[in-house]
């Protein structure tokens, strides 16, 4: 059962720090590597226990430009690739190539909803991924600062929708060399609640659960997001007329974001 698909590309929710030169657009190329494992125990529905593992590599170009109230983020998907044998068809991933999205990174360090450009699919899982791509960094952050952020993101899943509410505790560490810059290290610990539904051949499935995770991310003095890593474990429960008892789903995922030269 593929519940999260591309939406599990997400990191902790947030935005970029205030740049040193607010008039100069920034264009950065990123690679997002994610490995995920889903263990589904369908014995309550007369099925087997099943483990689904996949690895995705997504390449995106992000351009940030000043606008009223913050910065506009314009994102273009360059390509998305999956391992051979992935449950996600490569043809579906190929259809994402060239798709563009835009959103607002507010002056308060919050990210608004990303929307597709032109006639793109507003329910694309890419929109959920982008809403949680950047670390939440408050303006003027310095080593030793700590803060909390709460976010809620609606992520499309195949034939359904999943809402994820996340509370993240951040702490700024010392500066470290990263991508040729002296970047601030941001450590985070987060917990999430998830709820949604999905249409299946056996009827509507109700999804609910919780998750916990940690992340380490890096931000340059000029506000550039310089990548990082995160890991999350989620426990979901799937119920519906197709099973006499809820079906447990255990998900582990790790994500690494790197800046491409």
Image: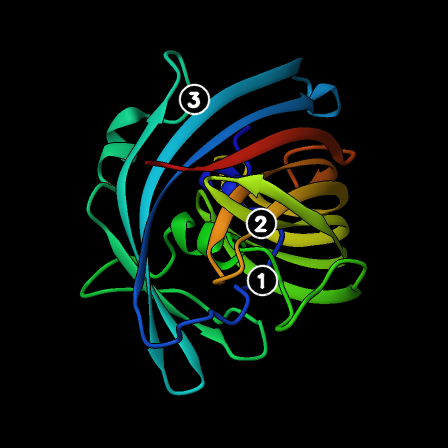
Q: Earlier in the sequence, mark 2 or mark 3?
A: 3
Q: Which label lies toward us, 1 or 3? A: 1
Is residue 101 visible from the viewing direction of this image?
Answer: yes
Secondary structure at numbered mark 1: loop
Secondary structure at numbered mark 2: strand
Q: Between marks 1 and 3, how big is the CA–CA gap?
A: 30 Å
Q: Earlier in the sequence, mark 2 or mark 1?
A: 1
**Residue 227 or 105: which is nearer the viewer?**
227
Secondary structure at numbered mark 3: loop
Q: Quadrant of the N terminus?
A: top right
Q: Residues within 10 Å of mark 1 (few under 14, many from 20)?
A: many
Q: Which label lies toward us, 2 or 1? A: 2
**Residue 19 or 151: which is nearer the viewer?**
19
Q: Which label lies toward us, 2 or 3? A: 2
**Residue 1 or 26: which is nearer the viewer?**
26
Q: State whether residue 118 is above or below residue 160.
A: below
The residue labelled by disc 2 is 183
Discs 1, 3 touching: Cβ within 8 Å? no
Q: Quadrant of the C terminus?
A: top left
Q: State whether residue 84 is above or below residue 133.
A: above
Residue located 43% across and 22% down the image: 87
Residue located 74% across and 49% down the image: 188
Residue located 52% across and 69% down the image: 111
The residue labelled by disc 3 is 87
Q: Residues within 10 Å of mark 3 (few under 14, many from 20)?
A: some
Q: Quadrant of residue 122?
A: bottom left
- Which label is found at residue 214? none
Q: Earlier in the sequence, mark 1 or mark 3?
A: 1
Q: Position of residue 72 (x, y in %)?
A: 36, 72
Q: Quadrant of residue 149?
A: bottom right
The residue labelled by disc 1 is 14
Residue located 53% across and 60% down the image: 221
């Amino acid at each position: 059962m593929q519940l999260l698909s591309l939406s599990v590309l997400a990191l902790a929710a947030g935005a970029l720090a205030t740049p040193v030169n607010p008039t100069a657009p920034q264009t950065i190329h990123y690679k997002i590597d994610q490995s995920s494992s889903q263990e589904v125990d369908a014995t309550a529905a007369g099925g087997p226990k099943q483990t689904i593992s996949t690895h995705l590599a997504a390449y995106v170009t992000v351009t940030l430009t000043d606008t009223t109230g913050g910065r506009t983020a314009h994102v273009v998907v360059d390509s998305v690739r999956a391992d051979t044998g992935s449950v996600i068809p490569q043809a579906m991933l190929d259809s994402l190539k060239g798709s563009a999205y835009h959103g607002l990174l507010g002056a308060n360090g919050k990210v608004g909803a990303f929307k597709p450009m032109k006639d793109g699919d507003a329910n694309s899982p890419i929109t959920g991924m982008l809403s949680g791509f950047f670390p939440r960094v408050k303006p003027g952050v310095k080593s030793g600062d700590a803060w909390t952020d709460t976010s809620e993101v609606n992520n499309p899943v195949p034939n359904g929708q999943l809402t994820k509410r996340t509370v993240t505790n951040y702490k700024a560490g010392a500066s470290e060399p990263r991508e040729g810059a002296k970047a601030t290290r941001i450590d985070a610990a987060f917990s999430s609640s998830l709820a949604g539904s999905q249409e299946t051949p056996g009827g509507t499935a109700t999804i609910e659960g919780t998750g916990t995770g940690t992340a380490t991310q890096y931000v340059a003095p000029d506000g550039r997001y310089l990548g990082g890593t995160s890991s999350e474990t989620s426990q979901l429960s799937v119920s519906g007329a197709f099973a006499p008892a809820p079906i447990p789903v255990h998900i582990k995922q790790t994500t690494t974001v790197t800046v491409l030269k």
